[in-house]
Image (spheres, grey):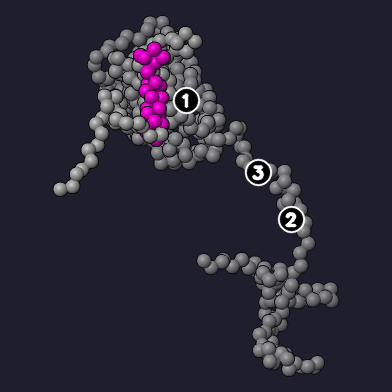
Amino acid sequence: MADTETPPAAAADGTADGPMSEEEQAMMAEWDAMASQALGVDGKPLGADTDDGGGTRILNQDEIDSLLGFNDASGQEQASGVMALINSALVNYERLPMLDIVFDRLVRLMSTSLRNLTSDNVEVSLDQVSTVRFGDYMNSIPLPAMLSIFKAEEWDNGGLLMVDSALIYSIVDVLLGGRKGTPAIRIEGRPYTTIETKLIERMVGVVMSDMSSAFDPLSPVSFTMERMETNPRFAAITQGSNACVLARLRIDMGDRGGRVEILLPYATLEPIRELLLQMFMGEKFGRDSIWETHLTNELYSTDIDLQAVLAEKTVPLGELLNWKPGSTVFFNTRPKDRIEVRCGQFPMFKASTGQKQGMLAVRIDKYIPPAKKSE
């Protein structure tokens, strides 16, 4: 039975008895460097709040979590630090300059329409136009509120209009003859009645009509209300992560008033995105109207050569070589037949032949449309 060599026993420090090789020494040095980075300057963990005396302060775990935007002790997600930057980048969509002009026009139209509806002095102001994610907005709606889902018929998509509780009671109070100067009384803890819902639907219909008029200079569109909801869970019109344009409007009627928020997903605005990217009404991208007009005028004054082809005939090459001066070639064209007028190799017109002032002439009878290329 052959003798087997027994491996050297491991030392207490984790190394084998006997001298270490250069590779093992390099590995031990690398482990020591990693261990020193994981500990503070005085041997404490990296999360400890210490100062090495040279002005370098090591963050503790709470500060690291706050910087990264992790949940705090109460379980609420903090909107600061790196996570805030990531979340803002997710909805950092392109700016639509013409949309601001549309909403400014909407404010002026609503001021007049709501004044006629309520017979009161109504002031409408645009607080903000921003970009949000649909899911974040639905979670931020203050309840109770009324959510109106509407559809843009020509764009084949929808949007959302939110009326807050303060404006609901203010509109109901004004339309039912409430006294001026008296703030609307809120009755919380109950669903909205049928009368209140119908009155708000009437106001929403006025806003929808004004929105259609505001978009008319860009693109004719009809906004129609589909239904009213009081629970945001039943008012989902797009995916929660999709970006939307949010317009916040403030409506004041003396001491009463509230907010209206209009939410339009980017998918809804996609059919007119090129129009909304304009800096001013009627802007043309990548086009120079002066150069186009000049080029058109020059093309109209260009001289071209036209050929009136009386007849054509295809003959074999052998017969063509036998032609001599005085040879006669017969064609099937008669004097009353119409001939073809060409520009280069392209047929342009059909014409009749004749004479005018002792010269041969043709009279154009029909335009020949260009032949379509076969795929």
Mark 2, other Cα within 10 Å: few <14 / some 14–19 / many ≥20: few
Q: Which residues are magenta?
A: 23-44
Q: CA distance from mark 1 to mark 2?
A: 48 Å
Mark 1, other Cα within 10 Å: few <14 / some 14–19 / many ≥20: some
- 103 in relation to 306, above or below: above
Residue under the image location 67 percent in, 69 percent down: 346
**Which mark is on residue 287?**
3
- Across and down, in percent, residue 40 comes to 39, 15
Q: Secondary structure at mark 1?
A: strand
> Quick one: label 1 or label 2, which is nearer the N terminus?
1
Q: CA distance from mark 3 to mark 2?
A: 18 Å
Q: Are marks 1 and 3 in contact (CB under 8 Å)?
A: no
**Residue type marked 2:** Leu
- Across and down, in percent, residue 28 comes to 37, 28
Secondary structure predominantly adopted by residues drawn in magenta? helix
Residue under the image location 67 percent in, 84 percent down: 313
- Across and down, in percent, residue 9 comes to 24, 31
Front-lying residue, 336 or 373: 373
Name the residue carrying label 1: 130
